[in-house]
Image (cartoon, rainbow, N blue to C red):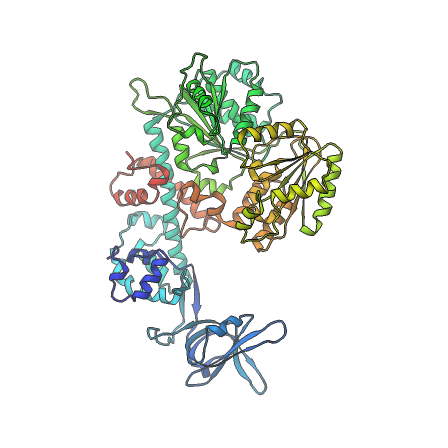
C-alpha cells in the first residue's frame, strides 16, 4: 500500500495525480510524508445571517456580482457573496488581478474577520479574506470549528485538494507504518508512535497535537543525521588509521622560527589542538575556522611541516588557481633556505612541467621528491600519486563536495604490515566563513572544530559604508585621493562583461561590468593611474604576473571579479569599492572586504548598491554594522536559512523537511546527545530491534556520508 503509485488509487483523480507528481509526490508514502507547513484555525461555518462582527468567521455561498473600484492609491476588487440567508460583502485591496479569477456564479468558501459597515446597522464585510473555490467534491458545510492543515501546494493543485487526497489514503496507510523506535525509547523521550505522529500531523484536533507531531518527526530527522555522523566516525576509527607524527619542543621551535611574526594566543591554542590529533594513529578530521585575516594558513603550514619533519608529505588543496599560486609563493618564501621541498600542481601546467611535478610528488625523481604539495582540483586526478601523504589541508572547505574531499584523503600510501586498517591521511579543513554553532553541530558533526577567534596585532578596523549608485562619482573621487597618497585599491564588479551580468540578472543592461568600469575609470576618475584587470578568464601566468605587479606597487587599482574573494593579501591595498553589492551574499561581501585592512593603515570598504528585496536590505545593513564574521554568520543563517548558508546541495547533504534549525535547537542538542550514546553502545547499529533504524538511516544518509553498508 505505501509503495502504491497514486495513479493506482481509484479515489484520487488523474488530474490530481499529475499535479502531485510535479511536486515530487508519486506514491502513497510520498503523499503521507507531504506534511502541512502550518495550521489554520477554521472557525465553525455559519449561515451568513448568523455571522457576528468582530470574529474570524467562515461562510460559503455563490458569488453574485464583482467589480473593480479604482479608489485613490488603493484600487480594490469587490464581490458580493449570497447564501439562502443573506449577503456578505468582500473586498480585496491592491488585488485587482482577482477580476480574472473570481466570477459571478462561482461557489466559494471565505474566511476572515467580519466588520459592520453602513448606516442603521449596515452590512457585513470582510477585507482581504482567504478564499477557495468549492467543487463537487467539497466537504459539506461544517458546524464544528477545526484545525485545518495548510500544505505546500502549487498553481496546479491547492492545499484543500491535497488535504482531500491525503484523506483518501491516510486511514489505510497508517497501520502499515512501522516504528524504528521501541515503545520504551518513545516513553523515555515522550514521543508519539510514528504512525500516530503522521495522523496528528495531518488531522490535528488542536495546536498541541500538531506540535507533538512536529516534535516527533523533527527529532527523527535530527537523530537520523546525528546517528549517521557518529556511525561514520566510529567506522573511521575502526577501519582506518593514520601515520602518527612525532612532536618535540625542538621541532616546535624549528617550525615557529619560520614565521616572521609572533603567533597569536588563539593560533597557539589551535596548534596545540591539532598537534594532539596528529600524534595519534586515529585519523584527524578537524575544521579550522576563523575570521578573515585571522591566520589560518599558519596552522596549515605548521601541520604540513610536522609531516615533513617526520619524513612524510603534506598537501594543501585550494579552490582556485590564484589562491593555490598565492599559497605556493607565500609558503615558499617562509621556507626559503630550508631543506623542505615544495611543489605546485594546477590544471594550467604544461605537459612536461606537470610530468616533472608528478614524478617529484611520487618520489620517483632523483632530486629527493616533494615534501609539501600545493594545488587545486588537479590534485584529485588519478595520475597523482604521493610518496607518503600524512596530512591533507583543504582550504575553503565549503567549495568542495564530500566526494572530492574523500578522493584526496584516499591518496595515502598502502597499508604496511599486519595492521589491516586502511591508511588514510590526517585531514584539516579550513574556512574563513565562520559556521554558526547550530550548523557545525548538525552538518559537521564528524569534524572536531577549532576556532581562531583573535586577529593578529596591528590590524586596524575596516570602515564600511553603503551608498546608492547616485553617489558613485563621490566614491571614486574619494578613491582617487587615496591613490594620490600612494595607497592601492580594489574595485569589485559582479561580471566581466555586460552580456554575462545581464544574463545573470534578468537582462539588466545598466549593470556595471568589468570592461565598462575599466573604460570609465581610465578615461575619467583614475586617468593617469595604473589600472589592471583580474578575472577568471585570464591565464594562470597572466594572473600571477598581475598579482605580482600589484603586490609590488606597480598597479594602483585592480578592477576584479570575485576571483580575489579569498587569500589575496596586499597590505598597501586600503580601499575597496564593490559595485552592485546587493548581488552578493553576506558571506561573500565579508570575504571580499577582508582583502583590505591587512596592514596598519586605516582601510575603507564602500558598497554601492540598491537592494530590491527585504533580504538584500538586511544583508547590506548587517555588513555595514559589523566586521565580526561570526556575528555575520549568525545573521546570514537568520536571513537565508541553513540550507543556503552551508550549501547543502553542494556538500551533498539532504535538506531537512520537518526540522527547523532555528526553532528546534533544543531538539538538535537532544538528538546529538542521544545519537552519541546510541553509537557508543551499538557502534554498527546491529543490535536487537535496530534493523529497521539502520536500514532507514543508510537509505537517507549513507551515500553522502560515505557509509555504504557499514561493517
Q: Is residue 628 visible?
A: yes
Q: Is residue 417 above or below residue 529?
A: above
Q: From the viewer's perspective, tell me whether residue 608 is left or right of residue 331.
A: right
In which image quadrant can residue 589 be found? top right
Q: Is residue 504 left or right of residue 83?
A: right
Residue under the image location 27 percent in, 61 percent down: 7
Q: Position of residue 143 (x, y in %)?
A: 38, 76
Q: Quadrant for residue 103, please give it.
A: bottom left
Q: Name which residue lies at 26% across and 52% down.
A: 178
Q: Quadrant of the C terminus?
A: top left
Q: Residue 139 location in percent, x, y?
A: 34, 73
When asked about the image quadrant of residue 415, the answer is top left
Relative to 64, does residue 660 appear above or below in the rendering? Answer: above
Which of these two is toward me, 626 or 653?
653
**Residue 438 visible in this rendered orientation of the protein:** no
Q: Say which of 233 and 68 sits in front.
A: 68
- Residue 40, x across and y down, in percent: 44, 65
Residue 162 located left or right of residue 587: left
**x, y percent for residue 133:** 41, 73
Amino acid at each position: 500500500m505505501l509503495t502504491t503509485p497514486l495513479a493506482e488509487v481509484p479515489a484520487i483523480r488523474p488530474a490530481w495525480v499529475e499535479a502531485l507528481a510535479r511536486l515530487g509526490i508519486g506514491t502513497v508514502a510520498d503523499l503521507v510524508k507531504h506534511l502541512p507547513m502550518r495550521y489554520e484555525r477554521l472557525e465553525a461555518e455559519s449561515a451568513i445571517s448568523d455571522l457576528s462582527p468582530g470574529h474570524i468567521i467562515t461562510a460559503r455561498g455563490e458569488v453574485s456580482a464583482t467589480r473593480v473600484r479604482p479608489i485613490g492609491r488603493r484600487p480594490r476588487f469587490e464581490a458580493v457573496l449570497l447564501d439562502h440567508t443573506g449577503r456578505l460583502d468582500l473586498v480585496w485591496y491592491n488585488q485587482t488581478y482577482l477580476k480574472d479569477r473570481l466570477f459571478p456564479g462561482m461557489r466559494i468558501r471565505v474566511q476572515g474577520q467580519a466588520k459592520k459597515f453602513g448606516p442603521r446597522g449596515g452590512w457585513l464585510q470582510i477585507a482581504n479574506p482567504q478564499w477557495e473555490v468549492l467543487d463537487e467534491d467539497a466537504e459539506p458545510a461544517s458546524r464544528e470549528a477545526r484545525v485545518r492543515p495548510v500544505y505546500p501546494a502549487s498553481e496546479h493543485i491547492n492545499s484543500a485538494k491535497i488535504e482531500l487526497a491525503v484523506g483518501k489514503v491516510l486511514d489505510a496507510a497508517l497501520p502499515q507504518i512501522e516504528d524504528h523506535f521501541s515503545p520504551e525509547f518513545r516513553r523515555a523521550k515522550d514521543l508519539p508512535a510514528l504512525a500516530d505522529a503522521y495522523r496528528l500531523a495531518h488531522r490535528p484536533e488542536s495546536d498541541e497535537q500538531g506540535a507533538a507531531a512536529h516534535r516527533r518527526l523533527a527529532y527523527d530527522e535530527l537523530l537520523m543525521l546525528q546517528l549517521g555522523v557518529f556511525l561514520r566516525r566510529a567506522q573511521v576509527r575502526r577501519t582506518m588509521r593514520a601515520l602518527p607524527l612525532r612532536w618535540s619542543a625542538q621541532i616546535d621551535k624549528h617550525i615557529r622560527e619560520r614565521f616572521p611574526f609572533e603567533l597569536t594566543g588563539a593560533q597557539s591554542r589551535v596548534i596545540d589542538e591539532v598537534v594532539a590529533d596528529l600524534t595519534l594513529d586515529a585519523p584527524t578530521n578537524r575544521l579550522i575556522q576563523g575570521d578573515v585575516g585571522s591566520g589560518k594558513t599558519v596552522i596549515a603550514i605548521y601541520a604540513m611541516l610536522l609531516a615533513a619533519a617526520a619524513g612524510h608529505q603534506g598537501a594543501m588543496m585550494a579552490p582556485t588557481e590564484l589562491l593555490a599560486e598565492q599559497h605556493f609563493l607565500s609558503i615558499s618564501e617562509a621556507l626559503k633556505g630550508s631543506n623542505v621541498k615544495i611543489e605546485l600542481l594546477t590544471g594550467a601546467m604544461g605537459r612536461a612541467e606537470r610530468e616533472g611535478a608528478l614524478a617529484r610528488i611520487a618520489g620517483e625523481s632523483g632530486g629527493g621528491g616533494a615534501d609539501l604539495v600545493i594545488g587545486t582540483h588537479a590534485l584529485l586526478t588519478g595520475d597523482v600519486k604521493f610518496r607518503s601523504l600524512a596530512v591533507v589541508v583543504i582550504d575553503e572547505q565549503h567549495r568542495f563536495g564530500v566526494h572530492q574531499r574523500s578522493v584526496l584523503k584516499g591518496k595515502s600510501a598502502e597499508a604496511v604490515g599486519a595492521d589491516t586498517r586502511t591508511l588514510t591521511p590526517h585531514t584539516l579543513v579550513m574556512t574563513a566563513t565562520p559556521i554558526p554553532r547550530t550548523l557545525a553541530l548538525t552538518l559537521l558533526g564528524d569534524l572536531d572544530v577549532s576556532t581562531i577567534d583573535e586577529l593578529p596585532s596591528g590590524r586596524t578596523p575596516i570602515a564600511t559604508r553603503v551608498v546608492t549608485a547616485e553617489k558613485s562619482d563621490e566614491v571614486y573621487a574619494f578613491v582617487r585621493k587615496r591613490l594620490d597618497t600612494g595607497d592601492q585599491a580594489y574595485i569589485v564588479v559582479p561580471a566581466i562583461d555586460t552580456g554575462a551580468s545581464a544574463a545573470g540578472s534578468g537582462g539588466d543592461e545598466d549593470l556595471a561590468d568589468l570592461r565598462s568600469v575599466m573604460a570609465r575609470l581610465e578615461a575619467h576618475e583614475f586617468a593617469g593611474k595604473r589600472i589592471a584587470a583580474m578575472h577568471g578568464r585570464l591565464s594562470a601566468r597572466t594572473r600571477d604576473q598581475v598579482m605580482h605587479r600589484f603586490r609590488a606597487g606597480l598597479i594602483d587599482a585592480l578592477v576584479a571579479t570575485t576571483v580575489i574573494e579569498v587569500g589575496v593579501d596586499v597590505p598597501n591595498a586600503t580601499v575597496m569599492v564593490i559595485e552592485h553589492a546587493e548581488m552578493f551574499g553576506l558571506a561573500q561581501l565579508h570575504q571580499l572586504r577582508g582583502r583590505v585592512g591587512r596592514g596598519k593603515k586605516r582601510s575603507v570598504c564602500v558598497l554601492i548598491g540598491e537592494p530590491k528585496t527585504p533580504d538584500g536590505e538586511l544583508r547590506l545593513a548587517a555588513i555595514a554594522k559589523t566586521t565580526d564574521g561570526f556575528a555575520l554568520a549568525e545573521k546570514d543563517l537568520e536571513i537565508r536559512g541553513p540550507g543556503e548558508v552551508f550549501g547543502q546541495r553542494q556538500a551533498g547533504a539532504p535538506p531537512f523537511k520537518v526540522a527547523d534549525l532555528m526553532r528546534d535547537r533544543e531538539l538538535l542538542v537532544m538528538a546529538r546527545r542521544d545519537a552519541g550514546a546510541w553509537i557508543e553502545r551499538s557502534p554498527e547499529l546491529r543490535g536487537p530491534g535496530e534493523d529497521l533504524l539502520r536500514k532507514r538511516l543508510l537509505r537517507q544518509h549513507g551515500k553522502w556520508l560515505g557509509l555504504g553498508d557499514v561493517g
